[in-house]
Image (cartoon, rainbow, N blue to C red):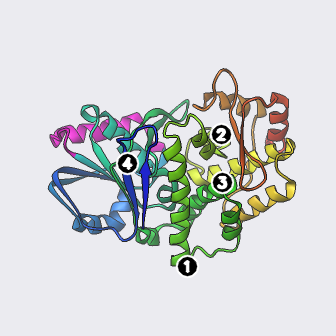
């Protein structure tokens, strides 16, 4: 099955997201696969069998969000120069969201831009991170504050790669699926409540549905000037949590799950969603063993960290909040005291 990306404001940019067994890929140019030791240990041999290129090589970088830095990007760039890639060369991002983000960003920089394709191997990257062209790295100030919008030439989503995914990583991907259901489709949410994602056919349908939602949003708003900002539901809180814990305690999807619960609690405070609906979302996250609690050490510091987020502007914080289940609101005018009251409900420690 194929889901197309056709950017409305950039008529010349379009590509396909293929959800199926990975096909044979042939390129009449130099190709470099960027991956990490975990993914290469499980699946690199299969990918090498499926790719035919004028010259094919592999760059392996360390695994983990803490390595999503400019230093790692420079390391990739140096290896591309050593292999004498030119502007017709191609990169393949083979891994999860961290690999995809850094490979795309590197592709945007090398000789002012070369092509890349995404072959995501985690559920989170298959349903979200690989689609839409967001690339970048983290720094000490926050998550993805350095980056570019740079679209891939194709995305190949093969659910087979998920068979070796640790349960915790799988659950982290579900958080992004829940995010899209709560924001855009109440029927989809209802379906997730009763779905067994261990069923291969159901999982494939869920991946397709999530990709269709993401593609529809990106097609309308590539650079997050409007509706695409809604995909940051839960992320405003999550990025603070990740920064506070040095990107080591939580997987991204786990932080998003906690962020969704925080956003919902704020929405309850503003009478935008009922407590019953908010509890249904929390229960769905817990069904997939996602964390839903977080101890805030300092409400004032947590609040100030919001302003380091790239979505804040003009000294105001942009919150993406649900209106019930299946609809959304973007609010930038919430009183500080209300936000801090909500934050204070999250078990301030020490």
* Any part of residue 347 in sight: no
Relative to residue 24, is residue 155 drawn left or right? right
Comes first in the chain, label 4 or label 2: 4
Residue 60 falls within the magenta-colored stretch: no
| Magenta span of residues | 66-89
Per the rendering, the mark at residue 236 is 2
Q: CA distance from mark 2 to mark 1?
A: 32 Å
User: Element under label 2?
Assistant: helix
- Residue at the spot of label 3: 184
User: Which comes sooner in the sequence, label 2 or label 3?
Assistant: 3
Specify the farthest residue to the left: 54
x, y percent for residue 124: 52, 57
Please name the residue shown 36% across and 52% down the image: 15
Left or right: 323 as drawn, with respect to 99: right
The residue pinned by badge 4 equals 14
Mark 4 closeness class: few <14, some 14–19, many ≥20 residues within 10 Å: some
From the top left corner, tell me how far across and down residue 242 is, in percent.
60, 43
Label 4 sits on a secondary structure element that is strand
Separation of disc 1 and disc 3 at Cα? 24 Å
């Amino acid at each position: 099955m194929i889901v197309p990306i056709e950017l409305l404001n950039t008529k010349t940019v379009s590509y396909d997201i293929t959800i199926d067994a990975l096909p044979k890929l042939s390129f009449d140019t130099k190709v470099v696969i960027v991956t990490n030791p975990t993914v290469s240990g499980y699946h690199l041999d299969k990918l090498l069998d499926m790719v035919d290129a004028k010259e094919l090589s592999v760059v392996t970088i360390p695994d983990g969000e803490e390595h999503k830095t400019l230093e790692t990007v420079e390391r990739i760039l140096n290896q591309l120069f050593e292999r004498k890639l030119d502007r017709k060369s191609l990169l393949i991002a083979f891994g999860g969201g961290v690999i995809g983000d850094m490979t795309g960003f590197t592709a945007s920089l090398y000789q002012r831009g070369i092509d890349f394709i995404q072959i995501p191997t985690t559920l989170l990257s298959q349903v979200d991170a690989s689609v839409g062209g967001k690339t970048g790295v983290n720094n000490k100030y926050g998550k993805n504050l350095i980056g570019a919008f740079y679209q891939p030439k194709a995305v190949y989503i093969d659910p087979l790669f998920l068979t070796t995914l640790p349960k915790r990583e799988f659950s982290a991907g579900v958080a992004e699926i829940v995010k899209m259901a709560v924001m855009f489709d109440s029927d989809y949410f209802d379906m997730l409540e009763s779905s067994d994602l261990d069923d291969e056919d159901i999982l494939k349908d869920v991946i397709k549905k999530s990709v269709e939602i993401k593609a529809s949003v990106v097609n309308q708003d590539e650079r997050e000037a409007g509706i695409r900002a809604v995909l940051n539901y839960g992320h405003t809180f999550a990025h603070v949590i990740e920064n506070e814990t040095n990107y080591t305690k939580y997987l991204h999807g786990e932080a998003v799950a906690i962020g969704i619960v925080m956003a919902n609690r704020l929405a309850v405070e503003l009478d935008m969603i009922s407590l019953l609906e908010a509890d249904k979302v929390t229960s769905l996250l817990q069904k997939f063993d996602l964390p839903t609690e977080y101890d805030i050490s300092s409400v004032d510091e947590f609040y100030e960290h919001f302003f380091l987020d790239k979505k804040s502007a003009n000294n105001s914080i942009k919150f993406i909040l649900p209106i019930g289940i299946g609809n959304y609101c973007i609010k930038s005018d919430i009183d500080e005291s209300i936000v801090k009251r909500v934050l204070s409900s999250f078990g301030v420690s020490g």
